[in-house]
Every structure is written in C-alpha cells, then in structure tokens.
Image (tube, rainbow, N blue to C red):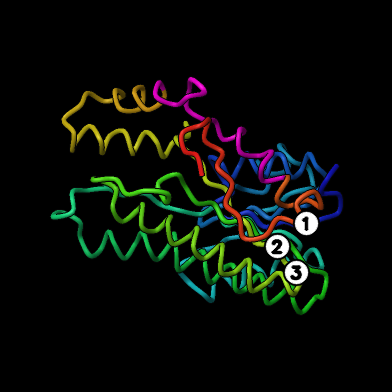
Amino acid sequence: MKLRDRIAVVTGGARGIGAAIVDRYVAEGARVAIADIAPPGEAEIAARHGDKAFGVKLDVTDRASIERALAAVEARCGGLDILVNNAAVFDMAPIVEVTEASFDRVFAINVKGLFFTLQAAARRMIARGRGGKIINMASQAGRRGEALVSIYCASKAAVISLTQSAGLDLIKHGINVNGISPGVVDTPMWDEVDALFAKYEKRPLGEKKRLVGEAVPFGRMGSPADHAGAAVFLASADSDYVVAQTLNVDGGNWMS
C-alpha cells in the first residue's frame, strides 16, 4: 500500500497505459481521478474500483478544462498529491507530407497540454504545502528521430526536456517531477500506428506490429501493466531522491 490515502489524477486514464496505472494506484491505496476527454461512466468505475476512483472530464488542449478538472478533484478529495500526465496522440507521415493541422494537434496535446496540466497541478501542490509527485509519460521515440515519425518524436523529446526543467525548478517545493519512457506497447493506439506503417511502408496489416515486437530484447511488446510498477515507484516515497529523470520501461529497446 505504497500510495495509501494519496490523491492521484491520471490524464488519459480511460484506456491503455493510463487505465493500467489507475488499476495499480487503486490497489496501492490511492484515490484516483480518471481524467479523460471521454471518462468512463460511474457504473463502470464503481464496478471496477468501488469508491476508490471517479471520472473527471478533461480536455488538455483547453486550459479552462484543466482548471475545472483539478478544482473538481480538490473539491471532492481535499487536495492533489500525484499527477500522471499520460494523455497523448500519435500521427506520422513523411516529412514532405506532414500537415500543419497534424503538427498543431500533436503538439497541442502531447506538449502544450502536458505542460499546462503540470503547471496547474504544481500551483495547487505548492499552495497546499505538502509537496507532490508529477509523472510525465514520454516515449522511446523522444530519444531519437524516426523518418516517418518526426512530429511525434519531437513532441516526446520535448516531454523529456520539460521533465528535466520542471524537475529542477519544482523540487525546492518538495515536488518531484520525473518521466517514464515506454517502448512499443500493445495498446489500441498501436493498431492505429500499424495501419499507418502499412500505408507508408506498403506492408500488410499487422506485419509492422509483429516485427517491432520481435525486435524487443525482452522478446515481446510491452503491455500497459508493465508500466504500472514504475508509475507506483515514481509516485511513492521510494523515489523521493529521484529528480528530473525519465525512466526507460521498454524491454531493453533503448539504453540511456
């Protein structure tokens, strides 16, 4: 019960890695706000988590929505101890085909939305005076460029950089900011990624997903649950001396 009585917000918590983190946080004793642009219904949450989780509507591209969501969590729970910035989108195309709309959407959600959610949470943690933990979900794509994935790679590189800067700035308030860098993860998003690779690399559907899974040193793609332990560690007292780091959780795909 490493997170007993802690109040956590997980953005993009309705599915994939976010949902796995919600499950594990509840098991570790936290009360969790599932903050999503389409949060699950109360009956679904109650069936899975009892009264230990609840839904909050959050659009990270809308600063007013961010403020409303965090204010609702404070009003319901009395404060905020943990933020997991997990909401993100993916897109890809050759450099000469990237559209301004695609660029703006990816950066609006993956970078701008993440930053201003972090800022709003940090302000509340500072005002409360009890410190806190902020965890930003990056990606192995943020460690390198990829020919077809330029804007997504750049957005996740920005997440790693923002994690470093925010970590250095906020630790004086007792707020640890760190990140998690997943590799290839078997989520519904990867079916969309596979379809895009099929389009641009002229592959059969499913082939790219199979190949990247086989290439992982561990021997398979990651699962959402593979990332929950790192999220617990970075949210708990075990990581109090960990500041401004982004932890690779990728089966050995990237070493840094």
Q: Quick one: label 1, few (<14), some, or many (20+) residues within 10 Å?
A: some
Kindly identify which numbered label has been placed on residue 176.
2
The answer to whether marks 2 and 1 mark residues whose Cβ atoms lie closer than 8 Å is: yes
Q: Is residue 108 above or below residue 141?
A: below
Residue flagged by tag 3: what amino acid is it?
A: Glu
Of labels 2 and 1, earlier in sequence is 2
> How far apart in space, not on screen, are marks 2 and 1 (Cα)?
7 Å
Q: CA distance from mark 3 to mark 2?
A: 20 Å
Lateral position of residue 25 relative to residue 247, left or right: right
Identify the secondary structure beneath mark 2. Answer: strand
Residue 58 screen position, x and y as percent? 55, 62
Q: On the image, numbered disc 3 is attached to which residue? A: 74
Residue 21's image quarter? top right
Going from N to C along the chain, the mark reached first, 1 or 3, is: 3
Tell me which residue sits at (48%, 24%) in the image: 217
Read off the magenta span. 214-232
Task: Report x, y in % for residue 227.
Answer: 61, 38
Q: Nearer the viewer, residue 92 or 37?
A: 92
* Residue contact at pointers 1 and 3, CB within 8 angstroms: no
Which mark is on residue 240?
A: 1
Helix, strand or loop status at disc 1 = loop
Q: Nearer the viewer, mark 3 or mark 2?
A: 2
Q: Residues within 10 Å of mark 2 (few under 14, many from 20)?
A: many
Q: Residue at x 73, y 49 (%)?
A: 53
